[in-house]
Amino acid sequence: MFQRIRQYQLMTVGHRWYRPRAYGEPQPDGTWDGWLVFFPLAGGAAIAPPGRETTQTTVAALAVWAAGLTPVYLQGALTRALGFEHQAPPLVERLSDAEYEALDDAERLETAAEVERTAADLDEAAAKAARADAERIRRERLVTEGTLAATEEAAARIEANIHEQAARDARAIAGAAKRRRRSVRAQAVSRKQPTRRRAKKKRAK
């Protein structure tokens, strides 16, 4: 009886996709033969290379072998299997319907997982865009606030200059008025002095 050992990532040839799986078959002497089978996602019978890939002493050793297969090895096995696509080995005919059903279930689960990953990517992209918008708005606000603050500062300086100029003008006017008062007083005093001299002369006569 065949036993599924491992399942691999999807592979493609042209526009056809395949799901690779490794199977083990126990032998009368206790060893295990290893096979590779490729299930077409578009439907139809599985394909496999014409002979076993390996023979291992135990099923555990077979699992280790299956875990070490590289994508290059699997691609080569798929190419060999395609060469015998119309001459399927007995292994393929002996695979139970349960294996095909399990393949369908696995593909549905993977499709659902891919949908979730896509949704997660979209959510992450939306979150990134939202963070970028928030940062842009913050920077624009800082620029706006800085511009407003600069405008207010300039207006305050202008107002201060106006008040300072008004104060200087007021001090200049006050100084001029003070000087005029002194001049008027001096002129008044100078006019009174000749009158007093004439009055003294008359009294002396």
Image (spheres, rainbow, N blue to C red):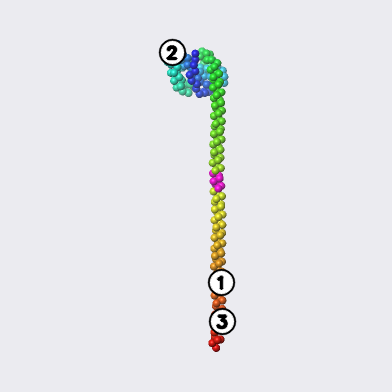
Gap in Å between the C-alphas at discs 1 and 3?
22 Å
Q: Which residue is mark 1?
A: 181
Displayed quadrant of residue 157:
bottom right
Q: Residue at x 56, y 30 (%)?
A: 119
Magenta span of residues: 139-145
Q: Which residue is mark 3?
A: 195
- Mark 3 or mark 2: name the one nearer the start of the chain: 2
Q: Mark 3, mark 2: which one is toward the viewer?
A: 3
Instruction: Report the mark closest to the observer, 1 or 2.
Output: 1
Which residue occupies the foreground of this view, 41 or 151? 151
- Residue 106: name its quadrant: top right
**Quadrant hosting residue 195:** bottom right
96 in magenta: no
Looking at the image, which is closer to me, 31 or 167?
Answer: 167
* x and y, in percent, of residue 161 in the image: 55, 58
Query: Residue 95 location, x and y as percent?
Result: 52, 15
The number of callouts visible is 3
Residue 130 seen anywhere in this rendered image of the structure: yes
Question: Residue 16: image x %, image y %?
Answer: 55, 22
Q: Secondary structure at mark 1?
A: helix
Residue 51 screen position, x and y as percent: 48, 15
**Does label 1 or label 2 sit earlier along the sequence?**
2
